[in-house]
Every structure is written in C-alpha cells, then in structure tokens.
Image (cartoon, grey):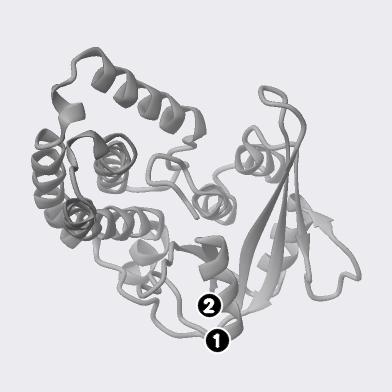
Amino acid sequence: MISDASEPRSGRLAVWGNALLAGLVSPDDAAVAIRGDDAVHRVRGLPGEPGPVGLTLALGRLRALGVTGWRVALPVAGHPLGLSGPAEFNARALEAGEAVVGHGAAWGLVPSVTEAGPAGDVHVEVAWECLPVREAPPADVPSLGEAERELAEGLREATRVLSQLDVAGSGPVAEAAIDAYRARAEAGRAGLAPGYPPRAVRVLELAERVGLLVSVAYEHGHGGAVSASEMAARGEALRPVERVSRRARVAAYNAYVEERERGR
C-alpha cells in the first residue's frame, strides 16, 4: 500500500514516460529518473520478450506497440481510482496499491517491490508486470480544476482534525513527527517531468501536503483517543480527506494525457 507521504513509483514512471513520449527527455534520462534510489527496475511479460527487460527497452517497445501516454491508478479497497479493468489487472493493481495504464494501446504495468539488506543499506528491486488493460475511461479521476477545489476543502478538514489531536498540541513531539514525514516525502519525490502544465504541479504539491497531514493524523494522533469508538470516528473523518488527496494526485499525474486529449 502506498503511503500518502510517499511518491508512488507509478507516478515516476508515468510522468517521465510521458516526457519521453513527448521527446523532452532521452530514454536513458527517463530510466534514471524512474529508478530514483532503487537499485534496478525490470519489466516482465512484455510482448515479444521471453524474460524481464530493462526500462529503456520496455518503454521503447510499448511505444512501438502504440502507447501514446501513461496514466496512473492509485486504488484502495472500495475505490478503484484510475482503473478501467479487466478484473485481473484491477486485482493486481489493488494488491500493489498502484499501477500505470497505457493510453493509445491496451497495456498496463503493475509494480512489485523486493527489499533486502540491513537498515540504511537496503537494496530495492522493482519488477513491473506488463498486462492487458481495458480501453475505457479510468474510474473516478477528476479534472485538475475539480481536484484543486476539492483540495482546498480537504486541507481545511485535515487541519481541523489534526488540531483536535493531542499530538497537535504537544510541541516538539508534533514538530518532529511532521518534519520526519516531510523529509520522507521530499526524499521520495520525483515531482512532475517536463511537459506538464503548471496547474498540475500546483495540484500535486497541495495533494502531497494534504496527504502529509493525513499520515501524521493517522500514525501520530492516537494520544487523544480514549476509546476504540473515538479512534474509529477519527478514521471516518480522515477517509474522505485521504480520498481527495489520492484523486488529486492521479489528476496531476494524468494531466499530460488529458491535456493532449483536449488539444485534439
């Protein structure tokens, strides 16, 4: 499952894959940006390839197969955000908490992550499974304008909930929690690649801020809860805010494809 305070690998692949398709970055630069701090990324199940291949070859092959853009899906149970089917792909994406879906050709990629080594020296390998997808509008993805409006309300609600928690008034403890989440988010962030509209950059940054507040409230806010029912009520209050953050992030990542579609 993807934390709201971290950058999904599907986001990195989509934005730099789109920049590559637009001719704004080289294949090698796109691959380096997608890998980030991971040791290696491989793609399995690519049509015409008997075994795993590297990102550069995979993205080039998928382009040759007709992919003209990449969208992101960030599904959770009960909310298939960004997915369009079929059932097998949706199930894989739900298990991973993320996926990328090709536009122009019916292929998608779902990551699985393997970690090994001691703390501070973890070796991370990512295997992307290439699977067929259904060519249909993605589920529940807002426009950038809709996402921006929702985020304004989501930020107010997340701040309100956080202010009610004991951690919000505990001085250095609260600040340390927020700083730790912010550092983790910045360390994993690739941002948006060249070719994305400024509004998408703004929406992604605000969505990550809202997600940061939600993460702090979930994991550092139980000090004020004296009963299971109060903790459950807190979760109920935060779930809609978390959904707003995820919807906005997907809208930002998908802006490249949506802008191209509107320009036709």
Look at the numbered discs 2 and 1 and tell me whether their residues touch, using CB distance below 8 Å. Answer: yes
For the question of whether residue 30 can be seen, the reply is: yes
Q: Position of residue 184 (x, y in %)?
A: 45, 29
Q: Position of residue 209 (x, y in %)?
A: 27, 37
Q: Position of residue 148 (x, y in %)?
A: 17, 52
Task: Check the image and report above or below for 150 versus 3.
Answer: below
Image position of 136 (left or right of 222): right
Q: Residue shown at 38%/46% (left/top)?
A: 4
Considering the numbered disc 2 on the image, is that residue within a helix, a strand or a loop?
A: helix
Residue position marked by numbered label 2 in the rendering: 90
The disc labelled 1 sits on which kind of residue? Pro
Q: Residue shown at 18%/57% (left/top)?
A: 229
Q: Position of residue 60 (x, y in %)?
A: 72, 60
For mark 2, does the 10 Å Cα neighbourhood hold few (<14), some (14 to 19), or many (20 or more) residues? many
In the depicted view, which residue is nearer to us: 149 or 238?
Answer: 238
Residue position marked by numbered label 1 in the rendering: 86
The disc labelled 2 sits on which kind of residue? Asn
As drawn, the label of residue 180 is none
In the depicted view, which residue is nearer to us: 48 or 111?
Answer: 111
Task: Check the image and report above or below for 153 versus 162.
Answer: below
Residue 111 placement: quadrant:
bottom right
Considering the numbered disc 1 on the image, is that residue within a helix, a strand or a loop?
A: loop
Q: What is the total number of numbered labels drawn onto the structure image?
A: 2
Q: Residue shown at 16%/57% (left/top)?
A: 233
For the question of whether residue 101 can be seen, the reply is: no
